[in-house]
Image (cartoon, coloured by chain):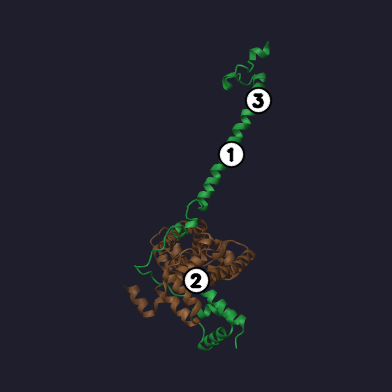
Chain colours: A brown, B green
Amino acid sequence: MLGLAASRKTGWKLAVRPDEELITEILNGQTAAFSELATRHRPRVERLCQRFFSDPEVARDLAQECFIRAYTALPSYRREMPFGGWLRAIVTNLCYDELRRRRRRPEELIADFSAPEMQWIGLVNEATPEDIVGAAEERREAHDLAHRLLETLRPEDRTVLTLKDSEGLSVSEVAETMGWSVAKVKIRAFRARQALRKQAERMTASGRGRSQ
Amino acid sequence: MMNCFEVRQEFAAFWRRELAPEQRSALVAHLKGCAKCDHAFRTFAMSAPVLHSAAEPPQRAAAERPVAKDSRARRPATVARGDYEPRRRGYAMSAAAMILVAASLAAYFSVTAPVGSLTDELSGTQEPAVQLFGSDLTPTSEDLAS
């Protein structure tokens, strides 16, 4: 109660203990502190998993697996890097392994569009840019189709794009996260954008062809 | 006035509604007048809901079809035979390779073993090979001694 009152009085920042403090407690045997650490980072971890997998259940499972791995590997955590970055490396590598496990072929991309998916492709072909942006936020099929498009990429290409575009990491940060060379990240990013453009054009052309 | 390069650099910010109103208007005006950038934006829009969206993905309505956990459910009929799953193909190829290696080893030993056995017999390190191969033609140590 005292802590709560103090935090209300002095601002929320005092109530939030740094990650390092919680990690020290966990390593000293106070495992309950891990729950606080996990609660703090769970939204970001789940969001990153959702960038890789459209199925919310798969994303949740992977997030859960990430925290199990983090807990197990916590003694090897080096404090010179932020805990969030360390956790991101774990979740990205988990998602990357899962992508490699369940990779689909590009020819599956233009297989069977549902009616809402066809509507979304039609909207992308015809509507104004501002209408497209507005509609994308409300339409689940826009999200699902984007996942289908990204699923045609090689796992490493998709990982690079996700880390660069969604997480806003630099090339060297992506390289550090994945344990790859900077040159590899640059090449993969370039090829990923090329492949993505090509597949997106196929998808929109297919939508145009079917609507005519 | 924005040029094509500047416009394409701002696609992500436009998608996330992070541009100032005047930048937004300039970008939209450019897209209206530039067919190439307009095409590039529409291509960008296909992956942007996942790669560039700041918001949570919208929830799926109950009436909509569920996203299959198994990607096979979405396969077209031409590739839905279920026989090209990379993992299964890997297992099949491993099994075939193992069978091939086992057959090669069996063939190799069936040819070389009698010679090796005879050598061992001559040197006295092994029992006569007649029991192993069951052939009356294989010389025994008594035969060789006489």
Whether pointer 3 and pointer 2 mark residues with C-beta atoms closer than 8 Å, the reply is no
| SS class, disc 3 | helix
- Quadrant showing the C terminus of chain B: top right
Q: Are marks 3 and 1 on the same chain?
A: yes
Q: Earlier in the sequence, mark 3 or mark 1?
A: 1
Q: Amino acid at mark 1?
A: Leu
How far apart marks 3 and 2 lie (CA) works out to 71 Å
3 or 1: mark nearer the eye: 1
Q: Which residue is mark 1?
A: B100
Q: Amino acid at mark 2?
A: Gly
Q: Are marks 3 and 2 on the same chain?
A: no
Mark yes or no: residue A83 visible. Answer: no
3 or 2: mark nearer the eye: 2
Q: Which residue is mark 3?
A: B116
Identify which residue is drawn at 59% across, 38% down. B101
Q: Chain of mark 2?
A: A
Mark yes or no: residue B14 visible. Answer: yes
| SS class, disc 2 | helix
